[in-house]
Amino acid sequence: MPKPILKIALDVPLDRLFDYLSGGTVAKVGQRVLVPFGRRSQIGIVMGFADTSEFPIEKLKPVTQVFAGELPIDTETLNLIKFSADYYQYPFGQALLSALPSRLRQIAPAVSRKQHAYQLTDSGRGQTVELIPKRQLVTRRVFEALQATEWLTEGELDAVSSSARKAAKQLVEDGWAIAKPVQAGLPTLELQTAIEPALNDEQAHAVEQIVQSSTEFKAWLLHGITGSGKTEVYIRLMQHFLATKDSQVLVLVPEINLTPQLESRFRSRFVNIPLVSLHSNLSESERLHHWQMAQTGAAKIIIGTRLSVFTPLPDLKLIIIDEEHDGSYKQQDSMRYHARDIALVRAKRLNIPVVLGSATPALESWHNATAKKYHLLSLNQRAVTAAQLPNIECVDTTKVNLQQGLTPQLIAALKLRLARKEQSLLFINRRGYSPVLLCSACHWIAPCSRCSARLVVHLGQRKLRCHHCGHEQKIPLQCPSCGNADLHPTGHGTQRLEQTLAQLLPNARIARVDRDSISRKNALVEILDKVHNKEIDILVGTQMLAKGHDFPNLTLVGVIDTDSALHSPDFRASERLFAQLMQVAGRAGRADKAGQVLIQTQFPEHGLFNALRSQDYVSYANAMLQEREQVQFPPYVFMALLRAEANDFQLVQQFLNHAFKLARGFNPDVTVYDPIRPQMERLKGMERGHILMQTGNRTALQKLLRNLVAELRGQTIAAKVRWTIDVDPLEF
């Protein structure tokens, strides 16, 4: 006899489960259900059963629907999300529902995605490709592909061209083809198996060490210089683990733009092994389909961004975290979890190995390796025998005349690469045309009305845009402060740099890669394909190009502006800058051609640049750790922030003062600092403030946070502001 009461997790900001009557329906733990909540219906997840409730049974409402045809979320995944919600002080129901694909949060059955398969009609078989206009190149290719086979699925059409589906539909309209719905399978491409390169001694040693401990939890830090072949180590490990029938491998990547290249590389080596990707660039139906394939165990390789760490994987045997140092693994809103840390917890619970790979490990990871909590594996030579680390030089911009922001040395180096038919990359971590619009008379700078930030000039669109909140406005004809018509874009962004290069090097083929230029789906993949096909001479880009990409013909990297980060009040700024510059420098000279890196700076003798020139991450990291220990910063202490924001700063102040008094009274072992405003005082129209809590004892911090959150929830002042807890914050 099933118990009459179901304990349901709902996507609401209350840290509790809700009681509903089963109404005789049979449900399992992890099952998706539809329940009435207030005046509306809501999706929930069954978390347990009970005979009694703290509420009168007659006041309980019955479950509206049980989605019995769907596979329940397994206990391991539920427990992982529960742990995460508890650690990061976030309501469990919201954490659980936000970890699911959006289709599973909608009030409808999550049916497996359907797709169409195409076949030529009798009329179509009687046609020839010459009847299709030559300008309709894709349509001709699709027609020829249909002639060569009986049926073509949408997945197979995608291998022909990104616009092949549209062409196939046109053939159907013309009566040359028919379409029938079929059950979507996993994407399969007819690829030739790539040649397996020989491992060098360091790579072979790393693989051997991890394989020997393949049946137990160990955290391996794979520290390899750029171009040392970390990906090949990943592939060999995956080969070992996937040799067993019931095995899955989860590969985490920090950003979406790294997914296609890695996916392509894996597909070329695992031709017959089902692989799916999980990231926000997928359509809702694609994401659901890939997630369900992973949940059933049908997909053996799962590549995904940070949210993928919560994907149900019944046969998970190995977790790989690529570019583990990357700040993108930290969620900066809602539940502020760190995917790397959650992956480590998941691996430990499953008693499986986890591999963290980076050329510039996070200081926390390096500290754990030196303290023997992680097992360190080093790759100190480049995988391509002839490849050498690039020569890094700093160009003192105070001693030369800049030509539109570029030094003569960098311009000469660019011209030399063009003559040699080699490729160059110019790195500037600012998109837009110019970061500032300045009045020459009164020095007015265009501010954002909603943020404590300056508006960025986007000259092509004749717009000023805030990169924090998205606010846009037209470029004014005169200064709003003094009426002066002489307004100058000041400083360089990617768009201005692209324009400058087009003027200086008119014969160069230039491509810009930033958030503005790759907003269209597959735009980045198309640009990277052109780079590999040597159809681009100079790449101009932001941090999107700084890591993970392999360009064999790229021999020059120019770094345009780094000085602002050298003197940031953020104690992590130098760590991030060093990692960023090491990563972008590593794009040069990865094949048999020598690489050169030119960094434009006013401070060429700064300690950070000295470490870069010697390319000595180990010494720099150890020195940074010594500094952190002296001043008691992470990883030697644990931190949490109580963040608050509201339209009126007085409300924020009242709330934080109240919370400050509460927190001070809970645990004397935790230092609670006075409320202050962050660097970005106002964001998206909201006034902001925070309280920093710090201690050497993680347990003490967690206890204080639990007590504090419990006290704050439900208080009148807490309802007037938007507040959240950020455990192990990366940004202040």
Image: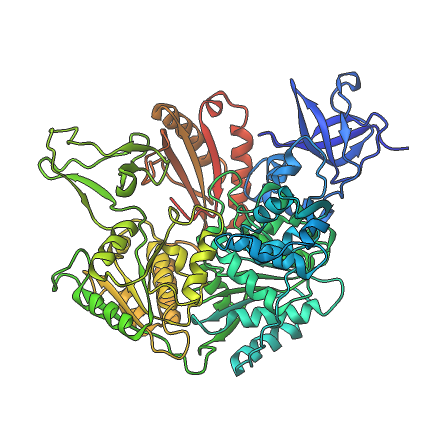
Q: Quadrant of the N terminus?
A: top right
Which quarter of the figure has residue 393?
Answer: bottom left
Measured as percent of width and height from the top left, residue 240 is found at 67, 72
Query: Above or below — where is 619 with respect to 129?
Result: below
Judged left or right of residue 314, residue 427 is left
Q: Is residue 276 visible?
A: no
Rendering coords of residue 139 (x, y %): 56, 52
* Residue 653 occupies quadrant: top left
| Lateral position of residue 120 relative to residue 732, left or right | right
Toward the viewer: 715 or 305?
305
Q: Is residue 184 left or right of residue 704?
A: right
- Towards the viewer: 564 or 440: 440
Q: Quadrant of residue 418?
A: bottom left
Residue 421 point in image, percent of width and height? 32, 72
Q: Is residue 176 above or below residue 594?
A: above
Quadrant including the C terminus: top left
Q: In percent of the image, x 11 and y 37: which residue is there?
A: 486
Q: Nearer the viewer, residue 157 or 319?
A: 157
